[in-house]
Amino acid sequence: MSIAKDSEISALAALSARIGRDPLLAQASSGNTSIKLGQVMWIKASGKWLADADRDDIFVRIPLEETRRHFAKGANLSGTYATRSGTGLAASIETAMHALIPHRVVVHLHSINAIAWAVRQDGCAQVTRRLAGLPWRWIPYVPSGLPLAREISAALASDPGTKVLLLANHGLVLCDDTSEAVEDLLWDVERRLAIPPRQVPDADRAALQSMVRGTRWRLPAIEAIHGLATDDISWSIVSSGVLYPCQAIFLGGVAKSFASCRSECFDSPFLLLERVGAVLNENITAAECETLAGLTQVALRVGSSASVRYLSQTELNRLLHRDAPAYRAAALKSREPVAAGILPSIPA
C-alpha cells in the first residue's frame, strides 16, 4: 500500500475514533465508516467499535466490484475479509450501501440529534428548514443491508450531488471526498440539528436502593438514565414502542416497568420505576448500557407535542428474526461483555 493511501486510511481511523468516543454521535458498535481507494473499499468490520479505530485494526479490505456484483444479484457480502494486518473479520451489514455511494468517504452515524428528528412523524418537514442550503435527502425507514442500499442508491440516482442523508428511525449518513470534508459537514449538520435535552426530576435514589438490595438489579452510574423514568414525556415515549433498531436489538424493545415485572423480566437489561428512577441488570453489557444511554438522550430531545413514528410490528419481526442475532453477537463479542464502572455497589 502506498504512503498516501495509508495516510488516508489513518485519517479515516482518527475521525472514526473521535466520532466513536462522542456518545451523541455513536453508541457501542453502532455506525460505520469507509473510504474508497481505487477499486478497494476499507470499511469498519461488523461488530467493531468506532471508538477503537485508532488503537485497533477494525477496517477490512472489500473489493468494490465484487460488492456491486453481489448487490446486482440481490445478495450482500458474507464471510470474512482481511484487515491491514491480515486478520479476517466479517463485513458490515451496510457494506453495499457504502459501496454504492459514489463519494470516496462515507460516515454512517447514530447521531442523537438526528435520530430525535428522525423518529418524528413530521421529521422531514422539521429538518427541511434546518438543513436549508445543504445537499440533503430524507430516506424513509427501510431495514439495514440491501433494502437500505437500494433506497439510498435510488435517491442518489435522482440527485447525485447529495452529501447528507437523514434516515428515518435510524440515523445519519454523510459523504464527501476526504475525511476532513466529511468532518466539517458533520459539525455543520450537528449544529443545525442540535436540540437541548429537557431538564428532568432527580431520581429517588434512596427508594431505588431499598428496592434493589439483595436482588440482581443495580443503580446506573450514568445519572441521566434515570430520566427515562422520572420524566413523564420520556416515560411515555419509551414505554409506547420501539424508536429505532438498536433499541430492539440491545434493549429488548419497549421499556418494562419494575412495578409490573415478573419472571420474564429477569433477562431485561434495565427496568423503569415511573417517577422514581431506573435500575440495571447486574449482567448488563457495555453495548447495552451505551445503547440505553443513547436512548435516554434521544427521548429527552423529542418534544412533548411531537407525534412519534414507532417501528411497526412487521418491521420489528424482520429486524429481530433476520438481522438482530448476528449483529448482536458480533457487537457483544468485540469487547468485554460486562461494562466496567456502570454499576455502583449497593450497601448491604
Image (cartoon, helix red, strand yellow):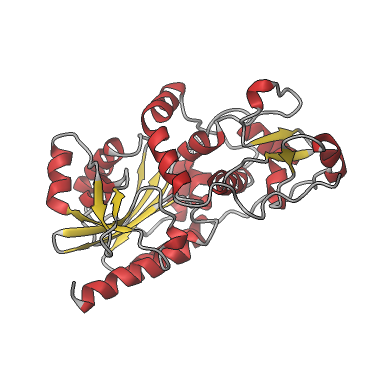
User: In the image, is 320 to the left or to the right of 343?
Assistant: left
User: Measured from the top left, where is residue 99 in percent x and y?
Assistant: 22, 51
User: Measured from the top left, where is residue 171 in percent x and y?
Assistant: 43, 47
Q: Residue at x 72, y 51 (%)?
A: 223
Q: Residue at x 84, y 43 (%)?
A: 204
The quadrant in which residue 154 appears is top left
- Tell me if residue 151 can be seen: yes
Q: Residue at x 46, y 37 (%)?
A: 245
Q: Quadrant of the C terminus?
A: top right
Q: Quadrant of the N terminus?
A: bottom left
Q: Residue at x 32, y 43 (%)?
A: 93
User: In the image, is 293 to the left or to the right of 192?
Assistant: right
User: Measured from the top left, where is residue 347 in percent x and y?
Assistant: 85, 47
Q: Is residue 132 above or below residue 13?
A: above
User: Measured from the top left, where is residue 234 in percent x and y?
Assistant: 66, 39
The quadrant in which residue 229 appears is top right
